[in-house]
Image: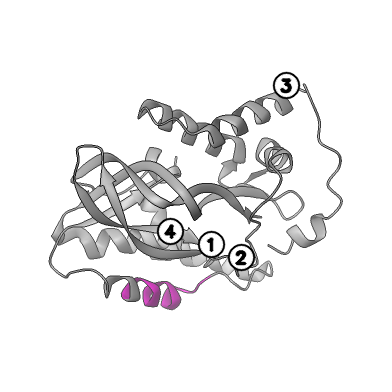
Amino acid sequence: MLKREELSSENIDKIVEDARKAGYDFFLTSEEREASLREALQRYPAGTEAWIFAYGSLMWNPALEVAEAQPCKVDGWRRSFCFWTPLGRGTPELPGLMLALEQGGDCEGIAYRISPDLVRSELAILWNREMLSGVYQARWVPTRLRDGRTVTAVTFVVDTQHSQYCGDLPIDRAAHHIAFAEGRRGACRDYLANTAAHARALSIHDPYLEELVERVTALRDGQWTLPTVSDLGAVGQA
């Protein structure tokens, strides 16, 4: 589990420094993260509460100070394992996959409310967590809470022009990477399992997640195998 203290600017800057030394020069500096946050806050009414839409690990490990959590739904965006992670839950030789929002469909998750006096500090922590490599773009989206309210929440959609992006990946290949990739943040399969389990606990039925869970389980049990991936050279640059 990711701990709040791990998301300090000092810790994140060290991760970025190590990533850049390894050749991943698209990781964002603290100045670039701060500029991104300032831009997002321009679309936020100062002095009011803020909402965050969580669809992946933020659902089960937010590491934020929240005033309220509500199951919710966002239209026009779908949950997708659509970008490579060669360090966090994978390696350059066998990168893992991480979730982002892609256009189309809809997505259910959790909306977190942040008190007005904590918006700046909590979003700074969120940016340290999510805006490492710049593969995400912050977006304020209409969000329907399960209790009937509609709010505007900030969330993270994928930048389809980023070198880590791998949209439309065949599901059998995605399952292979999720099943076997592991990195400094742990196993990619645990990320999937925790996300799917938390969705179920919220009475969210996501066929996409469930199919991946089934395929990953089968791969780990040796029930079927995927042919050797021959084009990892391109992936290794992600």
Label 3–label 4 contact, CB within 8 A: no
Residue tagged by mark 2? 19
Label 4–label 2 contact, CB within 8 A: no
Label 1–label 2 contact, CB within 8 A: yes
Magenta segment, which residues? 28-38
Residue tagged by mark 4? 156
Q: Give the x, y percent position of residue 45.
A: 18, 69
State the SS at label 2: helix
Of label 3 and label 4, which has the lower sequence position? Answer: 4
Residue tagged by mark 3? 221
- Residue 139's place in the image compared with 82, above or below, is below
Graded by Cα atoms within 10 Å as few (under 14), some (14 to 19) or many (20 or more), the crowding at tag 3 reads few
Type of amino acid under label 2: Ala
Of label 2 and label 3, which has the lower sequence position? Answer: 2
Give me the disc on residue 198: none
Type of amino acid under label 1: Ile
Q: Residue at x 73, y 28 (%)?
A: 219
Of label 4 and label 2, which has the lower sequence position? Answer: 2
Q: Front-most of 178 and 202?
A: 202
C-alpha separation, residue under disc 1 versus residue under disc 4: 20 Å
Q: Give the x, y percent position of residue 151.
A: 22, 53
Graded by Cα atoms within 10 Å as few (under 14), some (14 to 19) or many (20 or more), the crowding at tag 2 reads some
Q: Residue at x 46, y 28 (%)?
A: 197
Q: Give the x, y percent position of residue 48.
A: 14, 63
